[in-house]
Each structure stands twice: as structure tokens, then as C-alpha cells.
Image (cartoon, rainbow, N blue to C red):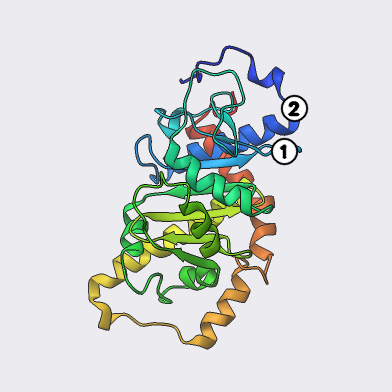
């Protein structure tokens, strides 16, 4: 199991609040691996460190997501400077995307970005996410879009990315690239990604019948399900369900199948 090459005992050197953020983020990395959304050592999930400093946690570059532990995560500031003692480095592309969202949105304490086959496939379709499944209707109103500008190494892209995300949406399809979600907690951020990725997968499967063979839901149904689904600004039912029931169940599954994330 990876140890992050830490020279100090991380748990004893950080606050209880930061340690909990580390455990939650490590759990997100393991869940991403468990659901098959990882992309070898690429893509990223980040968690803002509680407190007055604008620091956030991100994965050490070169580690598979199934190896990530609470102690191996790297703490950086919004300029990409590592602010803890570690031999690990971070991926500059991950810093560009995640620092942009963290800096712009106080509610975006957790930011998750993946490159799944189905997510990238939908991101390459001109119409984006279609209203053809209950899952898509639950999240579609909350989805923003950002045009592809190449590998995210240009810091100037941050301004355009956050402008496209806007002040209230929590999910984004990065054109020709992948998907992104954010939220107040690891639990709701993961749940948003779960439904977004499921909707993308269902769309790719449905479109095997051809575009003309797919049945779309009308505007009235789209509005109704968006309100019922709890994934938008105007409905918080799914957020409550996620924190109280879904997240504890996911952690129990991790403890059975991917133990050690909280070390």
C-alpha cells in the first residue's frame, strides 16, 4: 500500500477537521477506482482544507486511485505551491481545473473530475446530455458545458471555465474531455458524479438505436423530475438522503472491498 513518502506523521500534525477531509477525499479516490472511473494515474479529485487558508488537498501524481490514503494526499495553495513536507508532486493540469473552481465558488469544497469512456463520448456529442432517461432528467438542469481548449495547462483557461460553470451549477461536461462535479461535501459530490456518469452511459447505450429511435421526455416531464430528483438548487432531497444513507453505505462497501483509505 502506498504511503505517500511522508516524512512526518500527517495525522498528528494536522487538525481533526483536516484529517476528516483527508479521509473523505481518500474515500472518493477509492470509490472512483471501485466504480471503474479512474484513468490510470490521471484525473483528479480535490478537497478544500477547512480553515482560513486557501489550501486544498489533491492526489500525489503517479499513484493509482486504489492506492490513495488520507496521509498520501498533497496539500497545496491556490498558486500550486505544495505547503506540506512531502516528496510527492502534483499534476499541473489537475491544479489548473481544480484551483479555478475552488477559488471561484465558496460552496465548491470538493471538486471531482473524471475521463470515463461514456462521459467523454457524451462530451463529444453536439447535443450534450439528452433528456432520455430518468437519471438524465434528475441532473440535466444542473449541468453546464465548457468547450475544449487542449490539455488544461493554460492558467488563463480558469477564468473561462468558472464563467461557464456559473455561480449555481454543480456539474459540468467538459467538451471532448470528460465530466466534473462539485459540492459542499464528498458525499454529494460523488452522488452527483454517480448520476451524471450513469446518465451518460445510458445515453450511449440508447443511441445504438440511432438518434431517430430514441424517445425524449417533454419539457413538462423534464421540469417535474428535475424538481423531484434533488440534484438542483431548488431541491435538496437527494442531498439529505446522500449524507444520511448513501455515503455511510459507500464507506461500508469500501471497508469491505478497499480497506486502508483512512490510514
Residue at 31% across / 64% down in the picture?
Answer: 124
| Secondary structure type for disc 2 | loop
Q: Residues within 10 Å of mark 1 (few under 14, many from 20)?
A: some
Residue at 37% across / 65% down in the picture?
Answer: 202
**On the rendered structure, is 247 left or right of 94?**
right
Residue 166: tell me if it is visible: yes
Q: Residues within 10 Å of mark 2 (few under 14, many from 20)?
A: some
Front residue of 100/247: it is: 100
Front residue of 166/169: it is: 166
Separation of marks 2 and 1 at Cα, in angstroms: 9 Å
Residue at 39% across / 28% down in the picture?
Answer: 62
- Tell me residue 198's x, y (percent): 43, 60
Which mark is first along the chain, 1 or 2? Answer: 2
Q: Quadrant of residue 78?
A: top right
> Which residue lies under the disc numbered 2?
15
- Tell me residue 115's x, y (percent): 37, 49
Residue 246: tell me if it is visible: no
Front residue of 59/212: it is: 59
> Which residue lies under the disc numbered 1?
50
| Secondary structure type for disc 1 | loop
- Tell me residue 113's x, y (percent): 46, 49
**On the rendered structure, is 201 left or right of 81?**
left
The label on residue 210 is none
- Tell me residue 217's x, y (percent): 44, 83
Position above or below: 219 against 243: below
The answer to the question of whether label 2 and label 1 lie on touching residues, with beta carbons closer than 8 A, is yes
Front residue of 254/89: it is: 89
User: In what quadrant of the picture does the C terminus appear?
Assistant: top right
Give the number of marks. 2
Residue at 58% across / 28% down in the picture?
Answer: 70
User: Which residue is farthest top?
Assistant: 7
Amino acid at each position: 500500500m502506498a504511503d505517500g513518502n511522508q516524512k512526518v506523521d500527517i495525522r498528528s500534525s494536522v487538525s481533526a477537521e483536516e484529517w476528516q477531509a483527508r479521509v473523505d477525499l481518500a474515500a472518493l479516490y477509492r470509490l472512483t477506482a471501485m466504480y471503474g472511473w479512474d484513468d490510470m494515474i490521471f484525473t483528479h479529485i480535490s478537497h478544500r482544507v477547512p480553515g482560513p487558508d486557501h489550501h486544498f488537498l489533491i492526489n500525489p501524481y503517479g499513484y493509482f486511485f486504489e492506492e490513495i490514503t488520507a496521509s498520501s494526499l498533497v496539500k497545496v495553495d491556490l498558486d500550486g505551491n505544495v505547503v506540506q513536507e512531502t516528496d510527492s508532486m502534483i499534476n499541473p493540469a489537475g491544479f489548473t481545473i481544480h484551483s479555478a473552481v475552488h477559488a471561484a465558488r465558496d460552496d465548491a469544497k470538493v471538486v471531482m473530475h473524471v475521463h470515463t469512456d461514456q462521459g467523454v463520448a457524451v462530451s463529444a456529442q453536439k447535443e450534450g446530455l439528452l433528456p432520455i432517461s430518468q437519471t438524465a432528467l434528475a441532473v440535466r438542469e444542473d449541468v453546464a458545458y465548457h468547450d475544449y481548449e487542449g490539455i488544461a495547462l493554460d492558467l488563463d483557461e480558469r477564468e473561462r471555465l468558472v464563467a461557464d460553470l456559473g455561480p449555481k451549477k454543480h456539474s459540468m461536461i467538459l467538451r471532448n474531455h470528460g465530466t466534473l462535479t462539485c459540492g459542499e461535501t464528498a458525499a454529494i459530490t460523488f452522488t452527483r458524479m454517480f448520476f451524471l456518469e450513469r446518465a451518460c452511459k445510458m445515453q450511449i447505450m440508447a443511441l445504438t438505436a440511432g438518434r431517430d429511435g430514441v424517445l425524449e421526455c417533454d419539457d413538462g416531464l423534464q421540469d417535474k423530475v428535475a424538481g423531484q430528483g434533488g440534484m438542483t438548487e431548488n431541491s435538496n432531497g437527494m442531498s439529505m438522503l446522500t449524507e444520511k444513507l448513501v455515503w455511510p453505505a459507500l464507506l461500508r462497501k469500501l471497508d469491505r472491498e478497499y480497506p486502508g483509505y483512512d490510514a
